[in-house]
């Protein structure tokens, strides 16, 4: 990676815009997104005023112990989330990221979201740190079965049972107290260390290791821009913080930083 500053053209005679930089096709861009990226699509966040985790019972369900103690109740919860997510479409923030990729920019989206909306919007380079609600896996770690996609809404015969070992199947998402998939973490780590520009989009920045990627990017010389409705612990390491709904701020930012090439 270059020294982190010469891989994009400082904007001195271009539009002032929010960014001090211009993205070129050789700039490595990485995004870290959270629930705020999908909020304008209608998917509730976790810690906002009507956040999901204010319901203690739901937090208990989203743990390995909670799932195995009551797979039926857990599947009812995930069936409801799948049903809500199935009704939601990508918003302009998702489409702006997809437009960057289709315009030939080198962008990788590291996301905490499990809703799959980045892929629906057309993004290909996605690392789903916390898994996907549309993927199912066996709850028996010793089972040889592989995760598979299931888009049924709702899944009727819950709890699903594994064809190979008969154990209950579960959503292929990362529960509280669980480790992330080491191969995905490793890919995000390599990318973060070589990235030139790191966009933090709609995350409270308090859950690790996800939030740690912003710190790694900064430590390795990236230019960091945070887009959120309010300050977070990651604001202090950001070179720029852009306040507002990312469905509005992200398309504008990317249009400015690409000199108008990517415009939604
Ligand atoms: N535009 C930009 N930011 C927004 C918007 C929006 N329209 N709406 C909400 N936000 C911001 C909030 O200000 C908050 O900082 O998005 C963030 C959402 O924070 P959380 O609800 O904590 O969600 P997230 O950061 O994704 O949580 C991380 O915690 O429980 C785990 O697995 C879960 O992946 C999740 C992780």
Image (spheres, rainbow, N blue to C red):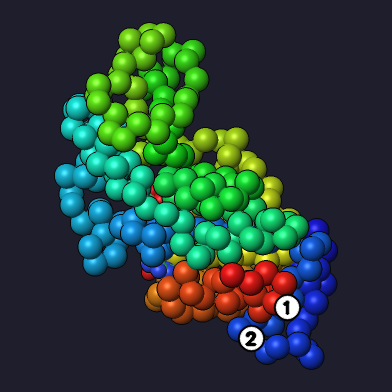
Q: Quadrant of ligand 1?
A: bottom left
Locate residue 125, reporting x and y percent: 64, 47
138 or 205, which is in the foreground? 138
Q: Image quarter for residue 6?
A: bottom right
One can see residue 148 in this view: yes
Q: In the drawing, what numbered circle is on residue 206?
A: none
113 or 152, which is in the foreground? 152
Locate residue 107, reporting x and y percent: 68, 57
Q: Which residue is mark 1?
A: 259
* Residue at 33% from the left image edge and 10% from the top image edge: 166
* Residue at 69% from the left image edge and 82% from the top image edge: 20
Q: Is 140 located above or below residue 212 in the figure?
A: above
Locate residue 43, reporting x and y percent: 34, 56
In the image, taking residue 141 as reference, residue 158 lies left or right, namely left
Cβ–Cβ under 8 Å for marks 2 and 1: no
One can see residue 192 in this view: no
Q: Is 245 located above or below residue 43 in the figure?
A: below
């Amino acid at each position: 990676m270059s020294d982190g500053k010469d891989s994009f053209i400082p904007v001195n005679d271009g539009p002032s815009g929010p960014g001090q930089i211009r993205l070129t096709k050789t700039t490595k861009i990485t995004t870290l997104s959270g629930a705020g990226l999908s909020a304008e699509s209608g998917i509730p966040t976790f810690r906002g005023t009507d956040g999901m985790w204010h319901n203690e019972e739901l937090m208990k369900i989203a743990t390995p112990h909670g799932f195995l103690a009551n797979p039926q109740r857990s599947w009812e919860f995930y069936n409801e989330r799948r049903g809500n997510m199935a009704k939601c479409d990508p918003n302009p923030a998702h489409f702006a990221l997809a437009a960057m990729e289709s315009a030939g920019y080198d962008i990788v989206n590291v996301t905490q979201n499990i809703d799959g909306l980045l892929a629906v919007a057309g993004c290909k380079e996605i690392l789903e740190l916390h898994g996907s609600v549309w993927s199912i896996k066996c709850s028996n770690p010793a089972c040889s079965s592989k995760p598979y996609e299931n888009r049924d809404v709702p899944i009727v015969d819950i709890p699903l049972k594994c064809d190979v070992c008969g154990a209950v199947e579960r959503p292929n998402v990362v529960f509280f107290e669980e480790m992330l998939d080491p191969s995905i973490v490793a890919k995000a780590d390599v990318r973060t260390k070589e990235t030139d520009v790191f966009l933090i989009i709609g995350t409270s920045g308090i859950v690790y290791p996800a939030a740690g990627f912003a710190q790694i990017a900064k430590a390795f010389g990236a230019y960091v821009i945070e887009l959120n409705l309010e300050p977070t612990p990651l604001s202090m390491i950001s070179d720029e913080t852009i306040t507002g709904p990312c469905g509005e701020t992200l398309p504008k930012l990317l249009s400015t930083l690409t000199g108008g090439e990517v415009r939604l």
